[in-house]
Image (cartoon, rainbow, N blue to C red):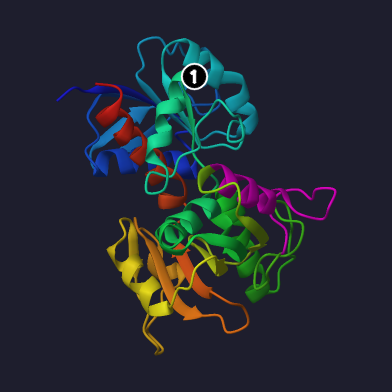
């Protein structure tokens, strides 16, 4: 089997570490793995697999010539600067930031949803990884769209603090402790208190009152699944460390029952259905942490609209919502294109 030289940008961050862990767990065929981060992290070490420790190199000084694949998760501004340089050097970049997602020459990929679109990477040598909340929603909805054609989606997300990075996780921990010991409560990452609270703002506000996170779900769904789908999203940050949850209401063009939806979802790749009408018959973020699949529960018909369903969808945002999706894209890339 051919082996590939792989670089991981943002290797010291939460998603970067998860990418390294996922590459090792899935035995991705590597000849060499290179950990890249900012100059202040250079010289440190990050784990790769159970025994290996990689020395972090400075991204600003790194030459991508000879690197086959780069998995990047270091922020949109950093991607804007280095991704074209890496792509020009002949490296195929799978970018986990928002910078290239809506570029018409860059495919935006969820392997279970639109794998054939990967072929478009040759235009710029770049593939974009979608937003975490979009990924889990579309994995759950693609089989239903194929069955009955989606007209409209109304989704409310309940997104964990890990989606905002390690510093956000630290803030939830520190604030929670401060409340219990009656210390001063400090806000540095979030605009409102996150401990024991929910915040209906993720990313910046746009002119129409929508947040950028909500806009991403609309725009990315149209690019990945179907441009005709109408979508309304409300994105909420919740005091959970890992795992995003979504309450999704879907209106279809054709009749579809909860029984039919449950049956098709049970057969779909990358989905686990746990849907029983009792106190243990659904999945929460705590239970999905560390898992690869998207979990679907609370499948029921919406009596307020014709051809409507309600779903509860949960996934580990660091794995399927970021690292695993990127690695799955790389697996398809070497299987079908980089032979």
Identity of the residue drawn at 25% across and 44% down: 25
Q: Viewed as shown, does residue 47 lie left or right of 131?
A: left
Q: Is residue 298 above or below residue 198?
A: below
| Outermost residue to the right | 207
Which residue is at the front of the view, 334 or 30?
A: 334
Left or right of 325 in this view: 40: right
Residue 126, position as x, y percentages in the image: 48, 25
Q: Residue furthest left?
A: 1
Residue 182 highlighted magenta (yes or no)? no
For image coordinates 21% across by 23% down, the residue present is 3
> The N terminus lies in which quarter of the figure?
top left
Quarter of the rendering containing residue 240: bottom right
Element under label 1? helix
Q: Where are the magenta residues, as a range?
A: 200-223
Whether residue 49 is visible, yes or no, is no
Q: Is residue 106 visible?
A: yes
Residue 112: x and y, percent? 37, 49
């Amino acid at each position: 089997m051919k082996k590939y030289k792989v670089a991981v940008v943002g290797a010291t961050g939460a998603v970067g570490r998860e990418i390294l862990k996922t590459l090792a767990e899935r035995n991705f065929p590597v000849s060499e793995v290179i950990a890249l981060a900012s100059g202040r992290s250079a010289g440190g070490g990050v784990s790769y697999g159970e025994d290996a420790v990689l020395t972090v190199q400075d991204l600003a000084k790194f030459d991508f010539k000879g690197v086959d694949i780069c998995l990047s998760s270091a922020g949109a501004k950093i991607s804007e600067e280095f991704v074209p340089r890496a792509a020009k050097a002949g490296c195929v970049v799978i970018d986990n930031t928002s910078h290239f997602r809506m570029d018409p020459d860059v495919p935006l990929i969820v392997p279970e949803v639109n794998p054939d679109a990967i072929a478009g990477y040759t235009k710029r040598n770049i593939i974009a990884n979608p937003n975490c909340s979009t990924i889990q929603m579309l994995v759950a909805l693609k089989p239903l769209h194929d069955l009955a054609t989606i007209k409209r989606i109304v989704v409310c997300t309940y997104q964990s603090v890990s989606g905002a990075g390690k510093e956000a996780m630290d803030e939830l921990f520190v604030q929670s402790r401060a409340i219990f010991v009656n210390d001063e409560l400090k806000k540095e990452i979030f605009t409102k208190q996150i401990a024991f609270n929910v915040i209906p703002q993720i990313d910046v506000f746009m002119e129409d009152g929508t947040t950028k996170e909500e806009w991403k779900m609309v725009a990315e769904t149209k690019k990945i699944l179907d441009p005709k789908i109408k979508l309304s999203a409300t994105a909420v940050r919740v005091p959970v460390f890992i795992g995003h949850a979504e309450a999704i209401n879907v209106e279809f063009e054709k009749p579809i029952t909860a029984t039919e939806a449950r049956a098709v979802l049970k057969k779909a790749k990358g989905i686990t259905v746990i849907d029983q009408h009792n106190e243990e018959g659904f999945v929460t973020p705590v239970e999905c942490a560390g898992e690869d699949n998207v979990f679907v529960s609370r499948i029921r018909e919406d009596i307020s609209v014709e051809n409507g369903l309600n779903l509860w969808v949960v996934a580990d945002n660091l794995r399927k919502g970021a690292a695993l999706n990127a690695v799955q894209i790389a697996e398809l890339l070497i299987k079908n294109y980089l032979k």
